[in-house]
Image (spheres, coloured by chain):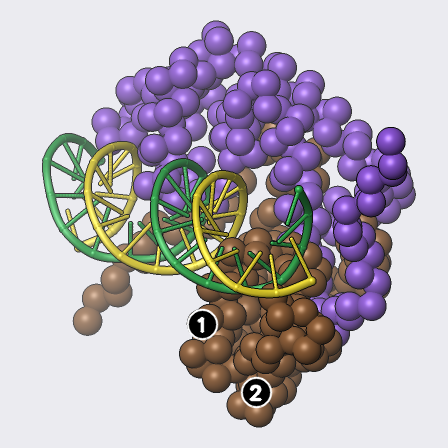
Chain colours: A brown, B purple, C yellow, D green
Amino acid sequence: MPLQRAPMVRRGSASIKLGVLDARLGYFIRRVQLWVFQDFIRALSGLDLSPAQFSVVAVVAANPGLTQAALSETLGIERARLARMLHDLGRRDITQRLPSARDKRSHALHLTGEGQKLFARARALSAKHEERLVKRFGTNRYNSVLAALRDF
Amino acid sequence: MPLQRAPMVRRGSASIKLGVLDARLGYFIRRVQLWVFQDFIRALSGLDLSPAQFSVVAVVAANPGLTQAALSETLGIERARLARMLHDLGRRDITQRLPSARDKRSHALHLTGEGQKLFARARALSAKHEERLVKRFGTNRYNSVLAALRDF
DNA sequence: TATTGTTATACTCTATAACTATA
DNA sequence: TATAGTTATAGAGTATAACAATA
């Protein structure tokens, strides 16, 4: 059987210059953010949890009983979108909305028993993802970038 | 006139914990990326150029004559989306697609005269945006974060 | 056969407004 | 009057597939 000719992959295209983009932090932040999210999605693909859904579950787990408004403000997710997300997570028996004693308008958010199990697995899978990031950056660089972005 | 009661702003909500998110780089990258893009969009609002459009114009300016496929691969923008973007930028007399001499399938991308003027202004406005980032991070942190993300 | 560029479709995310029930 | 939550809609961005022209 003859060898197939390798498809033209054009890996480097090294001659193409970024121009002024090479001095724009936003460009590199965006590229790295896309890479990180793709790796995260792959890491949690078995659980069918998006980065945004994971962030919701994580904050509810750390603050049982908080309201949707507080969650929305903490994560910067629009209230309207959060309502749909919680509807979906509720259908999947991950989160639940209990009536609030103090304010009948608001809900107290909790994880269900199933939600807690799912979160434990998601947390472990996301920790492996995080280890990949540490390796890719190197420990020192990872720590300094995390600290810089956290303080921003 | 009696003082109006200040609206409940709930600035800090300091009691809400991030939980495991506090050890996830992707969360902070996403938050900072959103802030940076919003500041960029505000900075260039007078020119009506999105970050993605700016990146296209910048790379065409730095590599006159390159093809859409090369541009697509460099910036990680889908060919399908890039076709629509260039259609729009062409309608606005910013970019132009000239026939390629060597390959009749492909186009050679260039800025128009108007496109070059627009790019000069966009570059200046984006430089002011970048200065805000430098101030916000501090020069040392800015430089180390930029280097780390660029090398990623 | 594979690549370039185009069109079309579907899905997600974002932004906004309008609505209800409570406060 | 303002807030909590919901629903609906429109606009971007992303991911695919299919297609014509060319290699």
Q: Nearer the viewer, residue A6 or B59?
A: B59
User: Which residue is at a point 60% across and 78% down the rendered structure image?
Assistant: A99
Q: Amino acid at mark 2?
A: Thr
**Residue B96 to residue B10: above or below:** above
Where is A110 relative to A28, above or below?
below
Label 2 Cα neighbours within 10 Å, binned few <14 / some 14-19 / many ≥20: some
Q: Are marks 2 and 1 in contact (CB under 8 Å)?
A: no
* Amino acid type of the residue tagged 1 in the rendering: Asp
> Which of the 4 image quadrants contains residue A34?
bottom right
From the viewer's perspective, is residue B15 above or below residue A111? above
Asked whether, in this view, residue A66 is left or right of residue B92, the answer is: right
Q: In the image, what residue occupies the spot 25% across and 62% down?
A: A4
Q: Residue at x 31, y 23 (%)?
A: B100
Specify whether residue B71 is in view. Answer: yes
How far across and down, in percent of the image, does residue A53 sit? Answer: 55, 69
Name the residue carrying label 1.
Answer: A88
